[in-house]
Amino acid sequence: MAGALIKTCPATEAPSSVLCGARGFTLLELLLVLALVGILAGMATWGGLHLVQGWQLKRAGHQLLEDLKAVQARAERSGSLALSGGALVQQNSFLIFETAAGSYAAAAWQDRNGDGGADGGEVVPLWEKTLPPGVSFGWVPGINRRACSNAIGAPGLAVSFASPSYDPCNDRPCIKFDRHGFSVIGPGAIYLRDGTQSLAITGTRPGHFTLCEWAGGRWR
């Protein structure tokens, strides 16, 4: 038959051999098998990418929550006063967000000259981190409830903590922690997305942080 691969028996092979006369695959059958393998490989690749993206989003959310708590714990350990130049001065710890750049940074401030404001050299950067690839500040379309309370209404800002003009916030969303771990300048929320899913972290004025995930109709 044209297009078929047929195995014939050599003259020296016994006719009763189990391999004698065994039929091969037609070209059409081989093409069908290759097509199925390609489809399955494509599905596996798409599913793998989806899983990786979801993992990156969860990783970003949990890392940000840990970093929030680490800066909060630092503020609690350090207290509200520090010794500088033989005098006690006020101090606070900050977490500042760069929403467009997808990054956030921690900083410490000591009021060395006692004027109540952050002047040159009084703010010390501690560290800076960037969100994982594919993850950004914001939320996916269709979200119509506020995190994580599920109050009706679309989110307003990707990071809704206050954006004071003074250093180190400089009109950027930031969290200012006092010696009790409280958020001095009020509550807020941080939204994260990867294109298909969203996570959020909410923070209260007393410094309680909650991580939640959008489940298609509500935060959980």
Image (cartoon, rainbow, N blue to C red):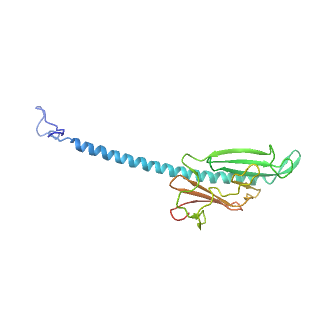
Extreme residue in the bottom direction = 152
Q: Position of residue 154 (x, y in %)?
A: 58, 63
- Rendering quarter of residue 213: bottom right
**Foreground of the two, 45 or 101:** 101
Extreme residue in the right direction = 86
Left or right for 38, reference 129: left
Q: Who's the residue at 52% across and 51% down the image? A: 55
Left or right for 85, reference 40: right
Q: Position of residue 149 (x, y in %)?
A: 61, 66
Q: Where is residue 75 in the image (x, y as percent from the top left)?
A: 75, 53
Task: Tell me the quarter of the image containing the C terminus.
Answer: bottom right
Q: Position of residue 215 (x, y in %)?
A: 51, 62
**Foreground of the two, 136 or 52:** 136
The reply to whether residue 157 is visible in this rendering is: yes
Q: Who's the residue at 39% across and 49% down the image? A: 43
**Foreground of the two, 60 or 100:** 100
Q: Who's the residue at 50% across and 50% down the image? A: 53
* Above or below, 85 relative to 178: above
Count all numbered tags in the image, as a single digit: 0
Task: Tell me the quarter of the image containing the N terminus.
Answer: top left
* Above or below, 36 relative to 155: above
The reply to whether residue 220 is visible in this rendering is: no
Extreme residue in the top direction = 12
Q: Who's the residue at 70% across and 57% down the image? A: 162
Left or right for 104, reference 112: left
